[in-house]
Image: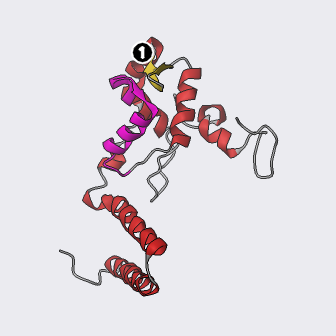
Amino acid sequence: MYDTETPSGSRGGFTRRHREHHPRRHGGPGEGHPMHSRRGGRGRAARGDIRTALLLLLADEPMHGYQLMRAITDRSGGRWTASPGAVYPTISQLEDEGLATVTAESGRRLVTLTEAGRKHVADNADTWADPFANYAAAGPGADLRSALEHVHSAARQVARTGSDEQLTAALAILDEARRSLYLLLADGPARD
C-alpha cells in the first residue's frame, strides 16, 4: 500500500503519503503533540484533526465510512469535506491501534469504537482541540465553497453542451464575477 523505496524528495524511506496517514510515527499530532495550524482555503484540516473528528463522531455512534465523511461535512456546515483518502487510512490506523473495529454489515463496513477506544476518548477528549470549532466560527460568508461548486458545475455544463455564443457569454460572466470579487476585497462596491 505504501511505497518503501526512497524517491527523491521523501525522507526516511517513506513517501509523503505514508507520513500524512501515520502522523504519530513521524512526530505529527497525537497524544501530547500540539495540533498543526490549519491550511487555508480548501476545506482541509490540519493533520490530526481527521483522527480526532472520527474518534468524537464514533463515540456518538458506529458509522460507515461514507457516514463519517457526511457527518464531518454536516458538523462543519459544509466547510470541511473529508476525502476517502483521509478517512479510510485513518480508520485503518484506529483499527491498528485497537481503538476501533470494522465489521461487514449489509455489504458495508461499519466502524465501531472498541472499549479501549471509548476509554481513550473519555480520558482524552477534554484535552483535544475541537476539530470543528474553526469551521463553526467562520460565519455565514464561509459557505462560498458550496456556491463555487455550483458555479463550477454550471460552467462545466456550458463547456460540454453550449454553443460558441454561449461559451463566449459564459467567459464574460465568469470574468465579470472575478472582477467583482476583487472589488469586494478592495471595498469597491457597497455591501448589503
Residue 110 sits above or below residue 24 on the image: above
Q: Report the residue at 36% width, 42% height from top.
A: 132
Q: Amino acid at mark 1?
A: Lys
**What segment is highlighted magenta in the picture?**
57-79
Q: Quadrant of residue 58?
A: top left
Q: Position of residue 138 (x, y in %)?
A: 31, 54
Nearest the viewer among 177 and 158 is 158
Residue 32 sits above or below residue 143 on the image: above
| Horizontal side of residue 86 vs 58, given as left or right | right
The quarter of the picture where the N terminus appears is top right
Q: Report the residue at 28% width, 62% height from top.
A: 141
Q: Position of residue 96 (x, y in %)?
A: 59, 21
What colour-coding does the image apply? Answer: secondary structure
Examine the structure image and report whether residue 62 is included in the region drawn in magenta: yes
Q: Which residue is mark 1?
A: 119
Extreme left residue here?
A: 192
Please tell me whether mark 1 sits on a helix, a strand or a loop: helix
Residue 92 sits above or below residue 14 on the image: above
Examine the structure image and report whether residue 168 is included in the region drawn in magenta: no
